[in-house]
Amino acid sequence: MKVSVSGLPKSIYFLAAAYLAAHLPFLAPSLEDYDSINFALGLRDFDPSRHQPHPPGAPVYIALGRIVFFVVDGVLPAADRSATEALTLALLSAVGGALAIVAFAFVCLRVLAPERRATIPWAAAIFAASPLMWISGLRPMSDLPGLAAALAAQALMLAGRTQNRALMAGGLLAGLAAGIRVQTLWLTMPLFAFVLIERRFPWRPLAAAAAGVLAWAVPLVMDSGGVDAYLLALGSQAGEDFAWVNMLWLEPTPRRLAFALYETFVLPWAAQPLAAIVAVAAVAGAVLAAVRQPRTFGLFALAFMPYAVLHLLFQETITVRYALPTLPLVAWLAANAASGSRWTPLVAAPVVVAGLLVAVPDAIAYARAPHPAFQALADAVEYARVAPPQAVYAHHSVWRAVQVADTGLPAVEPPRLHEWLGLVNYWKAGGRGPVWFLADPRRTDLALIDPQSRLDAVSYRWAVDGRPEFSGIRPVGADWYRFAPPGWFASEGWSLTPETGGLALATARGPDRQPIEAWVRRRAEPMHLVVGGRHLGDTGDSPADFELAIDGVVRDRWTVTVADRNFLRFMELPDGLAGAGDYARLTIASRQARSDRRPAAVAVRQFDVQPAGRMISAFGEGWHEEEYDPATGRGWRWTSGRALIRVKGPVSDVDVVLRGESPLRYFDAPPDVQVTAGGRVIARFQPAADFEWTVRVPAADIARAAGAIAIETTPVYRPGEAEGTTDQRELGLRLFETRVIPVRVD
């Protein structure tokens, strides 16, 4: 092993140089994650109160970014400033990755006994080749610059156990590193405290650390408008984190812990077989270290475990990049599994090769095209030259892309979490021109707008969508909707999706609190509508009396009890909707049927209004409540043993499209699935894998069945019995998509 004058093997420097050289051709072609856009906006106008970037502000990172931007923009001037900002921030990540490799090797050098140092190159190589570390070196984010600074501070602190100047430098760098990513304090301060205690509290290193923090904290507070203004912005950010982040601290259950461990120690390796190999090696290395090198093991644990605990308890672990600071510890433990033996290369080399085989193709795919939001914006700008919109709305995660791209489009800043209300307010105010909406495909609030008006859409997807190293990115794609005035649109309080239902519950705007409103375009022709919902109460709660009115005139009343639970009603409007204005106001209200019972909580889950000449459909008896995973944007419904789709309107053949999950995930053998109508079996399947079926149901069968199409599954899955839980449902198929498409006859 050839050793350089610094005491590190020369191979470490070659490894760092190779990492940097391999990343330069594949740096981010655009900004991408919501946070990267915040950083870019901070390069232009630093203002944490406006999340430019988000509090606490990363002032040291922004200062470094401005220096590099000045150089990059001078060497590679581009018409698109946001692309230059993406390149600037990605370059900081690539350089930060190379420095982090060297700094990690120095940490190992300061901790390991001389006879154990042969593992340093292999530990550094495993760290460098881990998919999360590899991808992080391409992205316009602060994670790797912050980690590099923290690792360098750790190395200096460890040297500071015998050298005063090194300890002072380590304290100063730790303070500055917190100005890149404040979470680095959990990597530096525990080790700093240990060395200070060991050295009997010398004051100069403490002063250096304080100086490092004050160097950025004082200008930050002054630039934010003072202490009160900064604390207000910081408190707002913290409140959002605790309100919306799915963290173990707020859900301390074995299930949440299992997910947190999986997301922290499996997803960063991108492939489960690779993660399993690394995990086995790391556990073996930890046992060996605890037995044979207890002091070394203790120092590594002190350097990295406090951050791991913070991450598991208080951070959103599905955002996998937050797990980056755990990788050095895992890499050293994996290399240590064969420490001190000739087998070290045989253990470490396959891990390095496998990591690169997983990471490099993803890096190439990442660099191939801009993020979908920026692709959509580029197309929208070109289209606007021919047919400009009256206004452009967006989900907040995409709105930041609109903001940073500076396209010149007539963009309207959206109300956060209620973005569809921008469209609602435009149409309510009499707007009738074409409007656009740039949507995050994981959001579902556009279900509150007539589905027929949502057909003019272009979807943009990312080549790396679904890759574990990118988990937690916001947004992962973009949908560009071009709206003409719709047939109907709805305001707050409707629960047509789990997302909008959650908002209705959080804001106390459901129909049991106040009438919920929709606006229906006036037509002289006959129309029909469907409304469905659910009583949310428990035994002993009052029945709910519903009332549906149009333009203040009650058109329908019905009562729903706890025992009935669900309701579905079709209603005819044979005379259409006449009156003043383009839209009629439709309201649905619910009142407590009995004063001697607890108030009835209810939700409206289904709604549609169409001309009578257009078929409408709804989920009838036998369907369970819609479910939704906000991390992936995937929604689904379970059927029971017999689930009905009900259709109304002109009788014609229909195609029923069913896309679902393999039942073998919960059945031992494929179940028997039948699609029936009017007592006749239309199709039969025995699904043994994920599926997408299209079943054509003849008009005669639909007429004979009075519009009821059944999906029958035998046997059913009972999760309560199988899993020992209180879930008493009977489950048939898990369906991600269920559509009814009338067959047009030419």
Image (cartoon, helix red, strand yellow):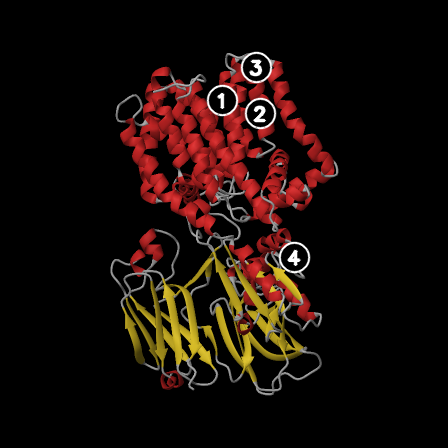
Cβ atoms under marks 3 and 2 closer than 8 Å: no
| Helix, strand or loop for disc 2 | helix
How many angstroms separate mark 1 from mark 4 (CA)?
Answer: 46 Å
56 shown above or below 375: above
Dot 2 or dot 4: first in sequence order is 2
Residue at 60% x, 75% y is 548
Residue picked out by circle 3: 165
- Please state the total of marks drawn on the protein image: 4
| Residue lying at 38% horizontally and 24% vertically, measured from the top left | 120
Q: Where the C terminus falls, by quadrant? A: bottom left
Q: Earlier in the sequence, mark 3 or mark 4?
A: 3
10 Å crowding of disc 4: few (<14), some (14-19), many (20+) = few
How dense is the environment of label 3, judged by Cα within 10 Å: few (below 14), some, or many (20 and up)?
A: some
Pointers 1 and 4 in contact (CB under 8 A)?
no
Q: Quick one: quadrant of the N terminus?
A: top left
Q: What residue is disc 2 on?
A: 173
3D distance between C-alphas at marks 3 and 1: 13 Å
Callout 3, which amino acid? Arg
Closer to viewer: mark 1 or mark 4: 1
Q: Which residue is mark 4?
A: 415
